[in-house]
Image (cartoon, helix red, strand yellow):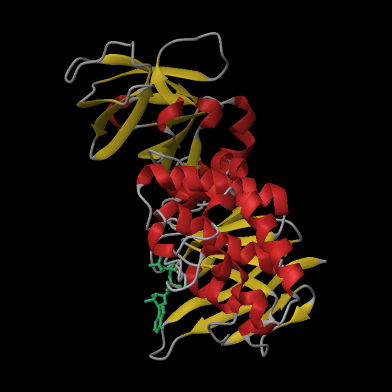
Amino acid sequence: MAQVSIRKVVKAYEGGVQAVKGIDLEIADHEFVVLVGPSGCGKSTTLRMIAGLEEITGGEIAIGGTVVNDIPPRDRDIAMVFQNYALYPHMSVYENMAFGLTLRKFPKEEIKRRVENAARILDITPLLDRKPKALSGGQRQRVAMGRAIVRDPKVFLFDEPLSNLDAKLRVQMRTEIKKVHQTVKTTTVYVTHDQVEAMTLADRVVVMNHGIIEQVGPPQELYHHPKTRFVAGFIGSPAMNFIPARVENGSGALRVTLPNGITVPVPESRTARYQTAAGREVLFGIRPEHLTEVKNLDRDNIAVFELTPEVIEPMGMETLVHLWLQGAEVCCRIDPTTPAEPGRPMQFAADLNHMHLIDPESGKVL
Ligand SMILES: Nc1ncnc2c1ncn2[C@@H]1O[C@H](COP(=O)(O)OP(=O)(O)OP(=O)(O)O)[C@@H](O)[C@H]1O
């Protein structure tokens, strides 16, 4: 049985904005699901409907098999962690973590056991007597998570919990959240606009755009097999290159022609799939990591062609090369030891096992 079921859920705000346009999603027990998408895509609204903080306009949400449409937030057996940790300033860390249980009239001993256990998981035992003002941002975030853990709810809901932290702390807390989930295994729904956070945390990523779900899948599946241009461009950093191209059928073999007379042969394994695109304009999609300097030419399905770098960005572990092909920006990832200079043409190799063709009209990956 799914722990959270979202069935044909619609949310229309007053004034007619349809923030969520009939989405379906089944979240399994113990699963960590991340809702990700650009600002305004409806991810927070979806989370708030699961929490009961926002009324549902249509459809139904069930938690643990019970439809909760008409059940108030406090009776939904969920715990929510927000970006502003909302700790009570006059209470100690212990009291902040215990508060929800005290309200629910848990026995003192049970409260102590749960708070101490959560403090151990989060490594904040030495902080239990402190007040929130004597804590760093990361420590406050741990206390906020502690408050959720002690409740032992069916579902954790996280709404951009790391967005107030600096870049370094974000990465640390991300690992911390993953570690906590591996320990307590509580079903989690997590909202972020950061695709790296989504990829690193999720068992399954839900990519939302304009109030709909574009694609749901494990991180690797979204990376390797995006179904739409939106997902292809959203997942991965730097983003996938989209180069205007045309599919040609020459003497039985399919090939893709790119600007500047560059031609790439379609790998045999893709011929049947792309046959219907013959004679059509497409977008040739390739990630920067699959468009590199020429090195291991023994691999199958490599196309080599000359390009002229325009901007070079050394990143330490790698170097990014930017260039423009008839207006389309193209980014390539090369080894930092490979010499590259703006204006000096060099050979690049495209790994065609990782190419994508996209219908420019529908945005669908072919
Ligand atoms: N209370 C509200 N009243 C009217 N419209 C709203 C309200 N809350 C959100 N919206 C609108 O609904 C849409 C989805 O908002 P939502 O906050 O769910 O998006 P989001 O993907 O979480 O974005 P962000 O990352 O910016 O929070 C947006 O167009 C937003 O302007």
Q: Where is residue 25, by image quadrant? A: bottom right
Image label count: 0
Between residues 138 and 200, which one lies in front from this camera angle? 138
User: Visible in this render: residue 208?
Assistant: yes
User: Visible in this render: residue 202?
Assistant: no
Name the residue located 50 percent from the left edge and 75 percent from the top edge: 45
Name the residue located 71 percent from the left edge and 82 percent from the top edge: 105
- Indicate left or right for 333 with 51 as reference: left
- Indicate left or right for 208 with 329 as reference: right
- Indicate left or right for 270 with 331 as reference: right
Looking at the image, residue 108 lies above or below residue 195: below
Name the residue located 69 percent from the left edge and 79 percent from the top edge: 76
Q: Where is residue 98, by image quadrant? A: bottom right
Between residues 68 and 218, which one lies in front from this camera angle? 68
Residue ranking furthest to the front: 129
Between residues 168 and 227, which one lies in front from this camera angle? 168
Percent position of residue 172, x then y = 48, 43
Looking at the image, residue 45 lies above or below residue 208: below
Looking at the image, residue 289 lies above or below residue 215: above
Percent position of residue 80, x then y = 57, 69
Name the residue located 49 percent from the left edge and 72 percent from the top edge: 91
Residue ranking furthest to the right: 1
Q: Where is residue 57, by image quadrant? A: bottom right
Percent position of residue 324, x then y = 24, 33
Percent position of residue 344, x then y = 19, 15
- Indicate left or right for 97 with 66 as reference: left
Looking at the image, residue 173 lies above or below residue 300: below
